[in-house]
Image: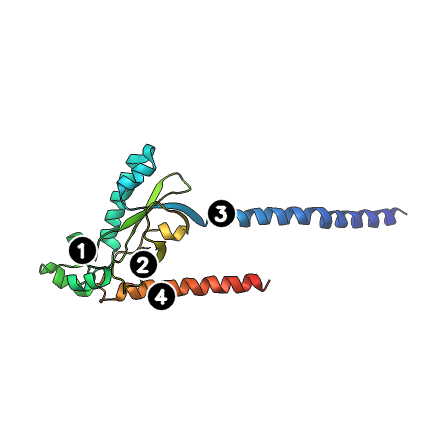
Amino acid sequence: MKRTKTIQLAAFRKSWNARHLTPVALVVTAAFLLAGCEKSDETVKLYQNADDCSAANPGESQQCTTAYNNALKEAERTAPKYATRQDCVAEFGEGQCQPAPSQASVAGDNQAQAQSGGSFWMPLMAGYMMGRMMGGSYAQQPLFSSKNPSSPAYGRYTDASGKSYGAATPGRTMTVPKTAMAPKPTTTSTITRGGFGESVAKQASMQRSSTSGTTRRTMGG
């Protein structure tokens, strides 16, 4: 009789664990997964310059100016560089290019040209993304745009890697991956005419493929 009670108690404990602990574990796991998803994106605003930012955020004028100046420095460091003004203008349009600062001059195969006084060309910064990160600090990312209708970057905001963020319309708010606000690598070589446009087109194609694949998986269950 005593052994029978023991067996029944063990079965009861096993049944209780299966019914009550498992849902709790699932809830905790789902919470962690949801938290991970929430931290993977950042909300940012797109501005043309510090004045636009300050007008939209009267109480954050200093932060707007700091973010704008930091974005300009990032643009000097990471923007696509061209060996000639003509190559840059062909990509971004007339009046959209400037000499690259000496400290942003490319290295490697072009180091001798830089040391001999040769200049490189880069597009003007067309705008910048600004967002408050999880820790409360601000981050920024320079944006470029082409005024050449034949360029894939025409009328669009793109970062230094060629990733597009939609129409070059300042004042927009959007959600971007955390990686979008991460510093881009320093440009270490010049690119050929049309090279940046090719990068924009390639990134757009990859994004469409990724979106299409996600849609198919969702529809498939």
Residue 102, above or below 133: below
N-terminal-most mark, 2 or 1: 1
Q: Amino acid at mark 4?
A: Lys
Q: Which residue is mark 4?
A: 202
Q: Decide which of 155, 191 is in the foreground and name it.
A: 155
Q: Amino acid at mark 3?
A: Glu
N-terminal-most mark, 4 or 2: 2
Q: Amino acid at mark 2?
A: Ser
Q: Residues within 10 Å of mark 3 (few under 14, many from 20)?
A: few
Left or right of 57 in this view: 86: left
Q: Which residue is mark 1?
A: 95
Q: Which residue is mark 2?
A: 161
N-terminal-most mark, 4 or 1: 1
Q: Position of residue 125 (x, y in %)?
A: 25, 51
Helix, strand or loop status at disc 3: helix
User: Mark number for residue 38?
Assistant: 3
**Disc 4/disc 1 C-alpha distance (Å):** 26 Å
Q: Is residue 66 something one can see in this rendering?
A: no
| Mark 4 or 1, closer to the camera | 1
Residue drawn at (42%, 42%) of the image: 134
Callout 3 touching callout 2 (CB < 8 Å): no
